[in-house]
Image (tube, rainbow, N blue to C red):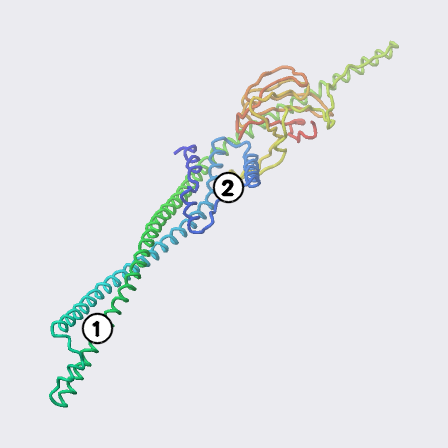
């Protein structure tokens, strides 16, 4: 799997809206909020700093390392999202279970109320039939009252017996009527309760369906969050292996770049020696001409040597490009290789294709593609302020003056991102007698 595929996977496995929706449904705060402007600016600064540290590193290794950093940066948030998604799933399952239990209880209440209502109806029917039968018997039997029954007795004992029997019949009738009224009242109450229970069951069924859907959604969200974490972990491991595999190659490239820099240093030392000899010869010739003019009684004005036009800082060199300085001259620890490297110049943050100008008059002594420097122009400016001064212009997209003399401010190239570059810019260096120094002192 290529690095571009891994980077796409890293970007793809952000927490999905489904996870966020599930968290919010159960009152859990979402772990990932939209970046504020300050957070984005901070992240951009961190990336810019990292790119500065990786300047001079091969594009392949930079790509792998940045992908690794991206995966590592996203992993904590993805793990937090997984934790909350799992909590949301647990809460949803619990809620689903609670609603299910409540529904089962309500359905059991419904069954008991239905049975009670049926039993009540049976009792009501039996009591009503008994009363109806008693009434029919009374009607068919002449409807004798308790008094007539008592008067029909043949002796005192029979009279007493008849009174007891009459009271018993009356009590049974009254009891049946009371039971009938109670049964009817209980039936009405049970019917009302049953209606309430059935309404509750309908509502609980609706809630049960919603709870089941939420639980299903929460489980899916938790699984999606877990997949995201697993993918990030896998990506991190794969890209970390790629970084390790490329380190050896990178160190070889670094050695080659250092060897090229050493060759350039020797060339510039030789250029400085020649320039110094030429300067001494020029001065000697000027002294000879001045002496001859003095002997002849005439005035001698030596020609102007420097084309310097001091700028706002009073430096000798012009700015090579119209753009801000985005990275300075410094020693840096390469976070990938663990090697301290000198960022031996300053970077101008400009787009590819921006015009590049000679910072002073001189001679192009070297141009072409040089390892990590990409397309490069080296200009010797001769002896300036007692040192052999040279300037280099690196990562160019196009070279216009490959050799020969150039004038101050002459268009010599266009910026680019060739060589070991993490983006379009100009890497500009100043060299004194073969040793790179901070260009800020000269421009």
Q: Residues within 10 Å of mark 1 (few under 14, many from 20)?
A: some
Percent across and percent down for residue 112 are: 25, 63
With respect to residue 322, does 37 lie above or below?
Answer: below
The residue indicated by pointer 1 is 176
- Residues at marks 1 and 2 touching, judged by CB atoms closer than 8 Å: no
Q: Nearer the viewer, residue 431 or 34?
A: 34
Q: Residues within 10 Å of mark 2 (few under 14, many from 20)?
A: few
Percent across and percent down for residue 404 are: 63, 15
Task: State the SS at label 2.
Answer: loop
* Horizontal side of residue 137 vs 181, given as left or right: left
Q: Residue at x 47, y 42 (%)?
A: 74
Q: Residue at x 56, y 30 (%)?
A: 258
Locate the N terminus by quadrant: top left
The residue indicated by pointer 2 is 34
Q: Nearer the viewer, residue 96 or 424?
A: 96
Query: Which quadrant of the view contains residue 119?
Result: bottom left
Kindly report the distance in space between the C-alpha atoms of the residues bearing marks 1 and 2.
77 Å
The label on residue 47 is none
Q: In the orientation shown, which residue stands out farthest toward the right?
A: 297
Q: In the orientation shown, which residue stands out farthest toward the bottom?
A: 156
With respect to residue 346, does 216 lie above or below?
Answer: below
> Nearer the N terminus, badge 1 or badge 2?
2
With respect to residue 340, does 311 lie above or below?
Answer: above
* Horizontal side of residue 79 vs 157, given as left or right: right
Percent across and percent down for residue 410 are: 65, 17
* Horizontal side of residue 48 vs 159, given as left or right: right
Query: Which quadrant of the view contains residue 425?
Result: top right
Percent across and percent down for residue 10 are: 43, 38
């Amino acid at each position: 799997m290529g690095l571009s595929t891994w980077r796409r996977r890293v970007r793809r496995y952000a927490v999905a809206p489904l996870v966020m929706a599930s968290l919010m449904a159960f009152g859990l705060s979402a772990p990932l909020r939209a970046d504020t402007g300050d957070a984005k600016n901070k992240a951009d600064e961190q990336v810019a700093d990292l790119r500065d540290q990786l300047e001079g590193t091969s594009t392949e290794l930079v790509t792998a390392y940045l992908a690794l950093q991206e995966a590592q940066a996203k992993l904590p948030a993805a793990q937090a999202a997984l934790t909350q998604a799992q909590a949301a799933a647990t809460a949803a399952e619990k809620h689903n279970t609670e609603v299910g239990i409540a529904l089962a209880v309500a359905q059991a209440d419904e069954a008991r109320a239905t049975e009670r209502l049926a039993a009540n109806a049976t009792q009501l029917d039996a009591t009503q039939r008994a009363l109806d039968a008693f009434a029919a018997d009374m009607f068919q039997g002449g409807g004798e009252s308790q008094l007539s029954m008592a008067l029909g007795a043949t002796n005192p004992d029979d009279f007493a017996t008849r009174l007891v029997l009459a009271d018993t019949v009356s009590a049974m009738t009254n009891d049946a009527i009371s039971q009938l009224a109670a049964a009817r009242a209980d039936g009405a109450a049970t019917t009302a309760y049953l209606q309430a229970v059935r309404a509750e069951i309908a509502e609980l069924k609706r809630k049960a369906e919603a709870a089941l859907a939420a639980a299903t959604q929460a489980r899916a969200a938790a699984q999606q969050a877990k997949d995201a974490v697993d993918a990030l972990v896998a990506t991190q491991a794969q890209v970390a292996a790629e970084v390790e595999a490329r380190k050896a190659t990178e160190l070889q490239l670094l050695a080659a770049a250092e060897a090229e820099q050493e060759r350039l240093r020797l060339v510039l030392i030789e250029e400085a020696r020649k320039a110094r000899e030429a300067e001494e010869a020029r001065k000697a010739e000027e002294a000879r001409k001045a002496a001859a003019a003095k002997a002849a009684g005439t005035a001698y004005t030596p020609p102007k040597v420097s084309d310097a036009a001091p700028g706002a800082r009073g430096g000798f060199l012009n700015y090579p490009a119209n753009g801000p300085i985005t990275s300075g001259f410094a020693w840096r620890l390469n976070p990938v290789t663990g090697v301290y490297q000198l960022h031996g110049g300053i970077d101008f943050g400009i787009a590819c294709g921006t015009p590049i100008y000679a910072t002073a008059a001189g001679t192009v002594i070297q141009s072409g593609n040089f390892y990590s420097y990409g397309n490069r122009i080296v200009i010797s400016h001769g002896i300036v302020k007692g040192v052999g001064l040279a300037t280099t212009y690196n990562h160019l997209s196009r070279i216009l003056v490959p050799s020969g003399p150039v004038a101050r401010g002459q268009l010599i190239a266009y910026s680019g991102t060739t060589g070991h570059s993490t983006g379009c810019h100009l890497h500009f260096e100043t060299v004194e007698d073969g040793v790179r120094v901070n260009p800020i002192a000269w421009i």
